[in-house]
Image (cartoon, helix red, strand yellow):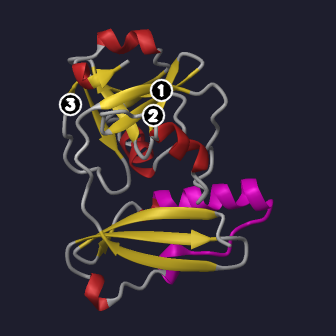
């Protein structure tokens, strides 16, 4: 019923990165439905009292005519290891609710916590987060992500990270990495590059 979703962070009643979610919603709406969205997140989102404390994941599910708000108490996954998986056909430019192609790749993670997706020898993303790499001086994110995340867009806009094409062989040029998404964007939890397994 709902083809698209925005996953939004709420912490102690405060909504984060709303302008970036609104922009992605508007862009996705026009790409998929070829019309301008009438959904204004700032006007729509009303936080129920029981979700005004702690870290909350809001899933704003929508189609061209309807929407639904799901509030969920959130605890971040503890991701320490990534398994490199290759899919030269994968495409997820819009935040669809259907993640079947990504889920199939996730099944290949073996003993690792998550996957690092490679397409045509280019690093793109993990299963549910953008990735940023530290080279000793700067934070770099792949220029061709699976999905342009809202945290990624904010960090690019503020100059905290840069983007460039990163091939799988470029991993040796980095010391560590971090995963960022709408829910995990405040403290950079650096993981050593050796924790990425081929």
Front label number (1 vs 3): 1
**Picture coordinates of residue 197 (x, y %)?**
32, 21
Crowd rating for badge 1 (residues with CA inside 10 Å; few <14, some 14–19, many 20+): some
Which element carries disc 3, helix, strand or loop?
strand
Most foreground residue, 101 or 27: 101
Residue 147 in sight in this render: no
Most foreground residue, 60 or 14: 60
Query: Which corner quadrant holds the C terminus?
Result: top left
**Picture coordinates of residue 153 (x, y %)?**
45, 44
Work out how far the residue at label 3 is from the one at label 2, CA to CA, in angstroms.
Answer: 21 Å
Work out how far the residue at label 2 is from the one at label 1, CA to CA, in angstroms.
Answer: 7 Å
Q: Which residues are magenta?
A: 20-44
Residue identified by numbered label 2 = 108
Residue identified by numbered label 1 = 85
Which element carries disc 2, helix, strand or loop?
loop
Task: Report how many numbered discs are placed on residues in the image.
Answer: 3
Residue identified by numbered label 3 = 191
Mark 2 or mark 1, earlier in chain? 1
Q: Does the magenta run of residues contain 84?
A: no
User: Which residue of the protein is positioned furthest toward the bottom in this rendering?
Assistant: 49
**Picture coordinates of residue 40 (x, y %)?**
57, 75
Mark 3 or mark 2, earlier in chain? 2
Crowd rating for badge 2 (residues with CA inside 10 Å; few <14, some 14–19, many 20+): some
Query: Which corner quadrant holds the N terminus?
Result: bottom right
Q: Which mark is residue 167?
A: none
Rendered view: 37 above or below 67: above
Which element carries disc 1, helix, strand or loop?
strand
Q: Is residue 113 left or right of residue 59?
A: left
């Amino acid at each position: 019923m709902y083809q698209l979703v925005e996953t939004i962070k709420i912490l102690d009643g405060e909504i984060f990165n709303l302008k970036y979610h609104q922009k992605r919603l508007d862009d996705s709406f026009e790409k998929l439905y070829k019309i301008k969205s009438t959904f204004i997140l700032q006007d729509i989102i009303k936080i129920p009292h029981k979700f005004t404390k702690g870290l909350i994941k809001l899933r704003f599910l929508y189609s061209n005519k309807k929407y639904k708000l799901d509030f969920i108490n959130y605890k971040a996954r503890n991701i320490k290891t990534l398994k490199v998986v290759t899919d030269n056909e994968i495409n997820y430019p819009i935040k669809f609710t259907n993640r079947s192609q990504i889920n199939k790749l996730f099944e290949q993670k073996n003993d690792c916590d998550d996957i690092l997706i490679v397409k045509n020898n280019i690093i793109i993303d993990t299963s549910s987060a953008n990735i940023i790499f530290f080279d000793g001086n700067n934070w770099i994110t792949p220029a061709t992500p699976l999905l342009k995340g809202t945290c990624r867009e904010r960090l690019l806009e503020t100059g905290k990270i840069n983007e460039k094409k990163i091939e799988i062989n470029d991993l040796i040029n980095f010391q560590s990495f971090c995963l960022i998404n709408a829910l995990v964007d405040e403290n950079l939890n650096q993981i050593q590059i050796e924790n990425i397994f081929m």
